[in-house]
Structure formats: structure tokens, C-alpha cells
Image (cartoon, rainbow, N blue to C red):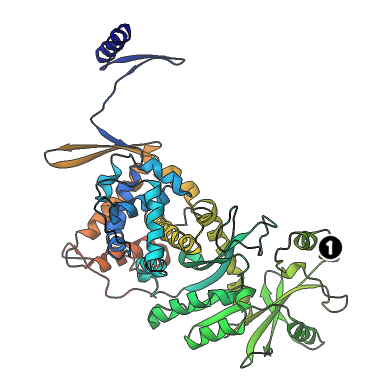
Amino acid sequence: MKTNVKNNAATEIYKSAHDSLRINTPGGIIQCRWDETTLVTPRCHNAFFSHFVQAGGAFDQLVESCPLRYSSNNAPSVRGVLATLFSGILEGHSRYRHLDVLHHDPVLPTIYGVEKLVSCDSARRAIRKMSEDDPGAALEWAWSANIRNLTPLLDQPYVLDLDPTVKPLYGSQEGAVLGYNPHKPGRPSHCYHTMCIAELRLVLGVVVHPGNQTSGMHSMGMLGHFLRTLPGPLRPRFARGDVVFGVDNVMEDCESNGVKYLFKLRRTPAVTRMWRQCLAPGVEWVDAGQGWEGCEASLQLDGWRCARRAVFVRRPRPLSQARGMEPGGRAGKAAETGQMEFQFPDLEVLPPGDCGGYDWHVLVTDLDHQILPLAQLYRDRGNCENIFDEMKNQWGWCGFTTQSLERCGVMAALVALVANLWNIFCRTMAPERHAEAKTSRPLLQQVVGRLTTHGGQKYLVCSASGQGKARDMYTDIMLKINEISTATQLSGEERWKLVLWYAFRKYNLINTCFPPQIGGQLMLPLAHPG
């Protein structure tokens, strides 16, 4: 009885203090008020981002084409599952468990047009169901959606970069085997084979293989499917890759699809013999930029069906900087752990008198460029490492790990899709350079929103730290997208093309006056540079 009296007294005290609750803090007394009726979210950036994505109907198309199907009346909606994954990846989540922080957000369902978001377990089971019901369909769905979003950019000349990266694993996952793993020697891994446009920091496709399948041969299925799917005008200017792609099968695949290539060759005995011939007196070496020299030759290795153009590039190596593979160094550690070892060009040392004190490598290509621009084109391939660093450390490529290799691939493709959209979204506001998630998220995602309804209209009142800059950036892009979206004579695909051209206006993809105005309405440019 006494307990009930105490509880009632506490309730009365709470009610009397409901309008104004005094809180004594080290900074002084603060008057606190509770508002239990207003819907508030700390993820207000989803409203702006979804408005941007809705300009081309990307999210709706993702839902409509999704192979996920439920038969139970108690199952979550497909749209709710994808809204949860979409929002979670956008926040930078890398584990399914992280998605639970979104489950009780009262505003996100309204933004994405769903009844509610789902739990992490429902999201995990949805990916598993897609993979089990129709193996391969889920990955094809995520990949096709990503390519569809980027298609308006592919009619411009671009370079297709091919490169694998390593994802260390810590459990008993499918495909968790020892491979080339420089950061975690002896640790099993997966290998992510990736196609990207390094200059624009856009990922076109990714497939996940066991950690010991690092050769370019394992990218052939992805590359061949990509080249066969795209019509001729959308194919890359040429494909570019490291030594793992300098094999005959990959080059033949490019040649059969009418795509030129630029790859590095492994320094096999036959390649080394040709290198020694290039060191003979009388061979002309020309400037290849940045202290390198180059000469070219015709090379046909065993197993090649024809001779191909090879470019040998060298740079003098000071004796004080000569480095070898010591038993106690990198090679020794690799032998102890049993993992694969990658032979870096500047770490290999030929016997004295054979290499002449040079760092050197060999490029194979069917391009018509001179040696200087050709060597620079290959050096530009280093931008791929920036993509991997961002995708693994700032997005979710090092997470969303399950025991199924296919499910890991599906989530990797979805992460790439959302990361690409966020990249484009940020470029619409700041086209001068790429904004990594590490800097763009603190600026644009620290937005709190209060959702109210009045007169049948929904109002979102936003507040952000550093609100002046974030407010101005969001306002500018929302006005521009509204201007594009109200052009009723344009289809959804044409509106999205204008959005992409505007985001990458730094590269002169559109006319200098954007958007062209005819009679006060938006019109597609009759022609654009390129």
C-alpha cells in the first residue's frame, strides 16, 4: 500500500513538472520540457538524399526489380527491407546488427514511404532468402540497378579499371582461405574483384571470390558480362589493370568485345629475356615521364595466339636504395604463414649485370598512344587504391560478413550502389573534387529533423551543427532538383541524366549554360561536348 502511495506521488510530481523540469547541471540550472507528440529524427539527411534519388526513380526501380518475394502475411514488406538497408548503408553501418538503431526511428518510414523499418534479423534473412530462392539473381539485381544509375555517364569516354582487393576474415565463412593478405599475414580472406572508374571514384561492379583467387582469370566472368551487356557506344575507351590481368585469356576477352586494353605483364623468364635484349647497346629509350624511360617491342609468349605490343619502362635505381627479398623479411613471413606472396616490381632484383641497376616493368597494350602518354595512363591507375580505401574503411566492404559467399557479394554490390549515389549527391553540391564519406558525413548527416502535420501537409523542421553551410548546400541542390523534376516534358531517365550531368559539370558533360531554358521550361541539350 505504501509503495502505491509513493508511485502516485511520484506521478503527480512528474505531471506537475511536465511543462518545466528544473535540471541542475555543472553549467547551471536548465529548464527541461518533454514533448511526446512530435516525431523527431537525427537522420534528417535521408529526406534530402531520398529526394535526390527520387529524381530518377532509383529507389522505386530498386524495389520493383527486387527478386525478394514473401508469401506470409506477417512478413515484412520488400520496400521496408530495402529502406532499412539503404538507410543503414548510407549511415556507414558495416554490420547487420547496426541496423537496429534505425528500427524505432519514427520519421524514416515516412520518408521512404513504408509502414515501418525492419530489424537486423529481418534484413539478414531477406538477403539469405534472395540468395537461396534463385542463386545468382540477387547479385544480378544489385549489379543491374547500379549500372542503370550510372548509364547516363557511360556515353562519355571513360577508362574501365580492374583491380582486386583483400578483405580479412575472422570466422568460418565460405571461401575463407589463405591468399595474398599483406596486412594480416596468415589470416584467411575474401578477394573482391572490382570494376570501377577511378577518376570519378565510381564502382561499376564487384564480385567476391575466395582469398586465393586473385588472378584476373576470376574477373573474366564479370568483365565479359559487363562488356556484352553494354551497347557499343557505352563501352569503355579501354580497360586497365595490374599484372593479374596481363594474361592471354583476359586480353582475348577484350579483343573479342572490341575493347582496347592496357595491362602490366608478369616478369616471367621469357619477358626477362626480352628485357635483356632491350638493354643492348643501340636500343633507343625515350622519355616516359617522372624519371622513367621506355622502349617498345613485339612480344609473343608461349600460349599467346599472336604477338602483342609490349612497352618496357625503366628507371635508374641508386645502389643505396637497392632492396632485396631477405629470408627474414616479407618473403620469410610469407613462408611461415603459408599465404601467397605478391612480387612487387621494385622489390625484385635480378642478378648483377642483368638488370643494369634499374627498376623496370612491362606493359602490354593495343592502344596507339606514344610511350610517354601510355606510361602516364598506367600510373593513373593508382586512383583505384583510393576507392578501395574509402569503400573498406568508410563504407561497408569490410563488414556485412556471413557464412555465404554469395550473400557477401550481394551486400558488397548494394554498398557500392549506395556509395555511388552518395558520391554523386555530394558532387551536385561541390563539383570541384570528390568528397569522401569521412568528411561529407559529419558535414551533411548531422541534421536533426522534427516532423509535423498541419492542414494535410507534412512539415520537416531541420537543425544542423554548422547549419549555415549545410543549410545552404542542401537548399541549393534541392532547388536545382526541383527545377529539373518539374520539367513535365522529360521522362524519368532524362531527368536523371540531367542530374548526373549537373553533378559532373566539372568535366563539361553539358553545355556551359545549365540548364538550357526554352520558354521557361527545362529542355535536354541538343548536343553536348564529348
Look at the picture and state if 50 lies above or below 330.
Answer: above
Answer whether residue 368 is visible to the viewer in this image.
Answer: no
- Give x and y (percent) for residue 357: 83, 73
Residue on which the image places disc 1: 326
Q: Residue furthest bottom?
A: 306
Look at the picture and state if 366 lies above or below 127.
Answer: below
- The answer to whether 165 appears left or right of 466 in the picture is right
Residue sitting at x 35%, y 64%? 500
User: Would you call the spot at circle 1 few (<14 residues within 10 Å), some (14-19), or many (20 or more)?
Assistant: few
- The answer to whether 27 appears left or right of 105 in the picture is right
Q: Residue furthest left?
A: 455
Amino acid carrying label 1: it is Glu
Quadrant of the rendered image containing residue 182: bottom right
- Give x and y (percent) for residue 214: 61, 70
Q: Quadrant of the N terminus?
A: top left
Residue sitting at x 47%, y 57%? 434
Taking depth in this image into account, of 387 and 524 the one nearest to the observer is 387
- Give x and y (percent) for residue 248: 60, 85
Q: Quadrant of the C terminus?
A: bottom left
Answer whether residue 96 is visible to the viewer in this image.
Answer: yes
